[in-house]
Image: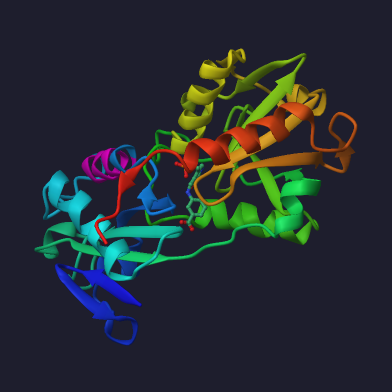
Amino acid sequence: MKIYIDGQMLDESEAKISVFDHGLLYGDGVFEGIRFYSGRIFRLHEHIVRLYESARAICLTIPMTFDEMMEATLKTVAVNGLRDGYIRLVITRGVGTLGLDPDRCPKASVIIIAATIALYPKERYEQGLTLITCATRRPTPASLSPRVKSLNYLNNIMAKIESKLAGCEEGIMLNEQGYVAECTGDNIFVVKNGKVTTPPTHSGALDGITRHAVMELMGKLGIDCKEEVMTRHELYTADELFLTGTAAEVIPAVSLDRREIGDGKPGPMTRRLVVEFTKMANSEGAPVPY
Ligand code: PXG
């Protein structure tokens, strides 16, 4: 596998970063997770836009233009000869000295990995995930905006650990006010009486690209979908729940806090959207220049 680091394509064994990189020392940096299907990168432009916005929000200057970043991403997939897989784009603050001050890092580092990913076991897509409500809350935007896809994912990791200790695959994260925000690495959707709702980003969700794609898809299919502030009540009383994310794609959830959702099986709306999303993902995207 060849990995892109700061303009070079390196073998995996040589693809290393300094122990003085502030991405490692302080989680100071931003990232993206992007999928490609059948030789085309899904929503590449949107992911790169979000990457630059995350960087801007933390005053991190990416030492490449938007177009150079698009090109480097496409090239990394091409060099590895992959047709289906997952890209991890990481921008770190770069090499500095000990001490928080980001001004001690003269240049940000750009890392692009093209590989494969399987987030949940295949049978989960057919049987659905089990969820708990995590005690760990999404941080308020006053401390760090949940819209920044930063290298600091401990909040989500703590919630993931909680979910797994409870014997579940995923967890619902609430915001400080107790409203539903999202899952630990996926957005959440509720289906009720044929209508679909999802929490707005100001409830503490990452502005998911899969979330957008699925909302767009529902628009085309004539399915009513709205953003709504919600509590756990809407989740417990839903007909169906499903999650969206780049790695997870569209996946049903069939229980929350040991309570069955609907009839405890993946519902017709979710199953339809899984099929339609797969079609969408395989029919668009930026072509990889092999
Ligand atoms: N919420 C959070 C907190 C996320 O990190 C999503 C929602 C879904 O957004 P997208 O744009 O992917 O539809 C994410 C996505 C990884 C990895 O290992 C990345 C995410 C989640 C889990 C794992 O690259 N980010």
Q: Is residue 106 left or right of residue 163?
A: left
Residue 84 vertical placement versus 175 (above, below): below
Residue at image position (47%, 25%) is 202
Quadrant of the image for the N terminus? bottom left
| Residue 288 in the image, given as x and y percentages of width and height | 29, 54
Residue at image position (23%, 67%) is 99
Judge whether residue 55 is colored magenta.
Answer: yes
Residue 250 vertical placement versus 22 (above, below): above
| Residue 125 in the image, given as x and y percentages of width and height | 72, 48
Q: Is residue 18 visible?
A: no
Judge whether residue 133 is colored magenta.
Answer: no
Q: Is residue 257 left or right of residue 35?
A: right
How is this picture coloured? rainbow
Q: Is residue 273 left or right of residue 17?
A: right
Quadrant of the image for the C terminus? bottom left
Q: Quadrant of residue 244?
A: top right
Q: Quadrant of residue 174?
A: top right
| Residue 212 in the image, given as x and y percentages of width and height | 46, 29
From the viewer's side, name the closer residue of 1 and 16. 1
Residue 96 vertical placement versus 134 (above, below): below
Residue at image position (84%, 32%) is 261
Span shown in magenta: 47-56
Magenta: main secondary structure equals helix
From the viewer's side, name the closer residue of 253 and 250. 250
From the viewer's side, name the closer residue of 2 and 206. 2
Residue 136 vertical placement versus 87 (above, below): above
* Number of callouts: 0
